[in-house]
Image (cartoon, rainbow, N blue to C red):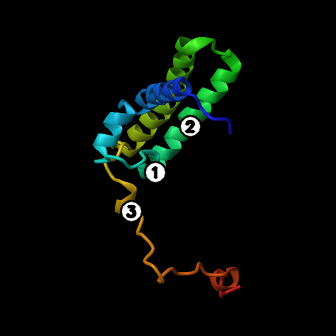
Amino acid sequence: MAACGHNEKKNFAILTNVLTQAWSGMTTGEYKRHKGLTKENLRDNMTNIELALNTLAEVATTELSRERNPKGMNESKQAAQAGGQVAKNARQDLERQLGHSVISSQRASYYIRPIEEGKAEELPSEEDTSNPHE
């Protein structure tokens, strides 16, 4: 991967912010504060639903950008906004069906137990998980 220049990193951060705000209603900074994060990575602390919606927003933005071939930052922001809107529509539909928000203040550390050194368990082999009644 080629090295990103300062402007490229800044533009990427701006577009990520536009995309995140479009689907979640929060900027990345607001979202991190909502989860109580300081230096931790937001994406690493999303629930499965949040991660799926974020991925949908990214994929939709990529496809829209391929179709529209944006020229400049303003057109790129429009594509990010539109891609985020796709995920927002999916989020709102799911929330209507669930009856509650899927935007969570939970962090990954709340639901992923760390593996204690020397105490990692192996996953069962296929023959261990086969149906004994077959």
Q: Identify whether 128 is placed above or below 90.
A: below
Mark 2 and mark 3 lie on one chain; the one further toward the N terminus is 2
- The crowd level at tag 1 (other Cα within 10 Å; few <14, some 14-19, many 20+) is few
Seen at 63% across and 35% down, the residue is: 3
Instruction: Determine the image quadrant of residue 58.
Output: top right
Q: Secondary structure at mark 1?
A: helix
Q: Which residue is mark 2?
A: 56
Q: Which residue is mark 3?
A: 111
Seen at 43% across and 47% down, the residue is: 41
- Distance between the Cα atoms at labels 3 and 1? 12 Å
Residue 81: image location, x then y, percent: 50, 22
- Residue in the foreground of this view, choosing between 62 and 39: 39
- Distance between the Cα atoms at labels 1 and 2? 16 Å
Q: Identify whether 128 is placed above or below 51.
A: below
Instruction: Determine the image quadrant of residue 72.
Output: top right
- Residue in the foreground of this view, choosing between 45 and 25: 45
Residue 126: image location, x then y, percent: 69, 79
Q: Identify whether 36 is placed above or below 123.
A: above
- Distance between the Cα atoms at labels 2 and 3? 23 Å
